[in-house]
Image: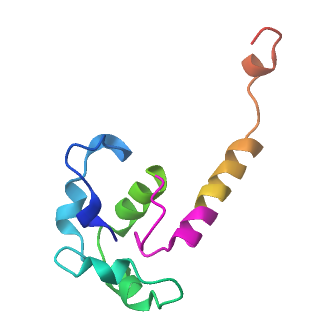
Amino acid sequence: MGLVQINAEQPEAHGGDRAWQDLANCLGVDPDLFFPERGASTREAKEVCRACVVREECLEYAIVNGEKFGIWGGMSERERRRVRRARGLTRVREPRTAVADSPGA
């Protein structure tokens, strides 16, 4: 899940509060479990995430910060990429406001 990679000096995202990390199921678990070799199973890491009370916060952190590796919030990078794409499509499909449509806006 990558908690070991988060640096205290790193600019904070997702509301700026990372206190959720102290409640994570992966705290104290070997980080290698969350960064499997290419083609290796992610099942065990996702099991740790499944019952985690801060799973959504972890996943949102990874999405907002563009984490490219590892299992975060129970999702692989491929799965998170789909979420990012879906959010991008949602933003494109939102109706434009009248202000944005007016000349000179």
* Residue 20 placement, left or right of 81: left
Residue under the image location 50 percent in, 74 percent down: 76
Residue at image location 26% in from the left, 65% down from the top? 3
Q: As rendered, which of 83 and 40 lies closer to the eye?
A: 40
Image location of residue 66, percent across then percent down: 48, 54
Residue furthest front in the image: 37
Note whether residue 51 is visible: no
Q: Can see residue 89?
A: yes
Name, please, the residue furthest toward the top.
104
Q: Compared with residue 92, is residue 30 higher up or lower down, i.e. above or below?
A: below
Q: Please report the residue visible at 28 percent of the width from the left and 44 percent of the height from the top.
A: 10
In the displayed structure image, the side of residue 6 where residue 85 appears, left or right: right
Which quarter of the figure is the C terminus placed in?
A: top right
- Provide the residue span drawn in magenta: 66-82
Q: Looking at the picture, how far across and down is residue 4, in whole percent?
A: 23, 65
Which quarter of the picture shows residue 24?
Answer: bottom left
